[in-house]
Amino acid sequence: MELLALLTVLLLAHAAAYLAWQAVSRRRRACCYLLDYACHKPSDDRKVTTETAGAVIERNKRLGLSEYRFLLKVIVNSGIGEHTYCPRNVLEGREERPTLGDALEEMDDLFADAVAAVLAKTGVAARDVDLVVLNVGSFAPAPSLVSRVVRRFGMREDVMAYNLSGMGCSAGLIAVDLARNVMLTRPRTMALLVTSESCAPNWYVGTDKSMMLGNCLFRCGGAAALLTNDPAFRARAKMELRCLVRANIAAHDDAHAAAVHREDADGRLGVSLSKALPKAAVRAFTENLQRLAPRILPARELARFACRLLARKLLRRKAAAAAKGEGPKIDFKSGVDHFCLHPGGTAVIEAVRKSLVLSAHDVEPARMTLHRWGNTSASSLWYVLSYMEAKRRLKRGDRVLMLTFGSGFKCNSCYWEVSRDLADAGAWEDCIGEYPPETLVNPYMDKFGWVNDVQGQGGGFVF
């Protein structure tokens, strides 16, 4: 009996040790560290100045006075400066006849710059990469772009490679989520994320105003990042992922049609942004925040908000408060130190600022990114994060919220904790001292404001 009891105790001890080891192992795999990242800076010969933009618009003889005035209004209010980048085929006057080579050249420039840079900065060899997740929304050649990365950098034969397309501006965080989920099943995984958008084959040359907006906002860019769940890299990591929330309201027809890659009435391809987009964005935004807030905000803030909301309902002041635009607001700044917002446009940034009750300082990184780089789609968040780092805002223990929107319609967010003081200027190195500028007003109105004084509806105006 004594022997049986001893064996029972040993078996129970072994089982407890095994379960404890499994719990520790799962916790380690659940960790996700941002080792480093690099933002793509295209060559200076691809910059879009006021004169360059005017020349590109003037080449389109289909445009009439109404379209010129519309474009001028959009560009003047866009918040975009004179140092954004365009694909070479547009600058060379071939926007109506893009080739496969043009699109691949744009991607190869990104791979040669950002991917090579992040590998060099971290000292990680390409053959040490276990997982590659690439997202480019509107260009999906065969072989895939992720296969092009694997081939270019000579990665291992057993590397896991995923190619995401059609996910829009929110795809960058979807790539993070995919990498994190893979890491949950594989210990000590090194993941390379590559995020960009293809502008070369997608420049719109028609006259549909809902599709002309993209030409005014979207610009070339991209980024690469290395994530890992290997605890050996924890001391070297820049940030650690705490949570990630995704909201997808594509089941609603108006939301699904808010941003669509389609042909216009004349068969010209482009991205159409409908009038339902702001409403879809608000719905997705609200859905995301409802699930995000309980995971990142302190209990005292959640309790304060709940009490104020309940008090208003009990006092029957809800209708009166709503009429005045008032109501209890939850304070996200109680759990977030820095807001890394998608610079989709000045209206997008301002809407998020008001919704979250943020200051001008909080949204400065997004506004400056829009001015310097334009909307680079899914990679924009990494330029915003890089601005924060270049300005030395990110200190150890700080909490960073990334928030982005995308076609579908989707709103994705992720919450990081800064692991150490950060000060790498990255792609901002040669210009960070100039930001923020005294004014964000661009020179388009000064140079092309005469369009508003022209009478008639004819086309072919010369800038």
Image (tube, helix red, strand yellow):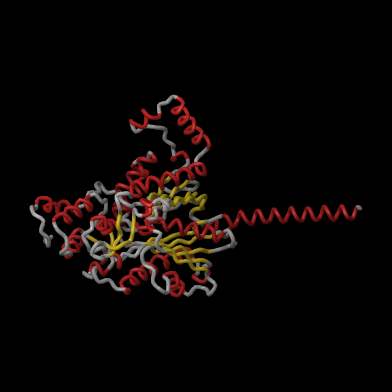
Residue 414 point in image, percent of width and height: 47, 51
Q: Is residue 151 visible?
A: yes
Which residue is rendered at x = 42% and y = 71% of the image?
144
Q: For this view, does 348 lie left or right of residue 183?
A: left
Q: List x then y, in percent, for residue 352.
A: 36, 44
Q: Nearer the viewer, residue 80 or 139?
A: 139
Q: Is residue 303 left or right of residue 377?
A: right
Q: How many marks?
A: 0
| Residue that extends furthest to the left in the rendered view of this protein | 455
Pick the quarter of the image with the C terminus: bottom left
Q: Specify whether 267 is left or right of 245.
A: left
Q: Residue furthest top?
A: 315
357 and 409: which is toward the camera: 409
Taking the spot 40% from the left edge, 29% from the top edge, the residue there is 318
Q: Is residue 44 visible?
A: no
Q: Residue at x 32, y 73 (%)?
A: 100
Question: In the rendering, at what x and y percent does residue 76 appear?
Answer: 21, 51
- In this image, 135 relative to 233: left or right? left
Give the vertical position of 174 relative to 325 (above or below): below
Question: Residue 355 appears in which quarter of the rendering?
Answer: top left
- x, y percent for residue 51: 18, 60
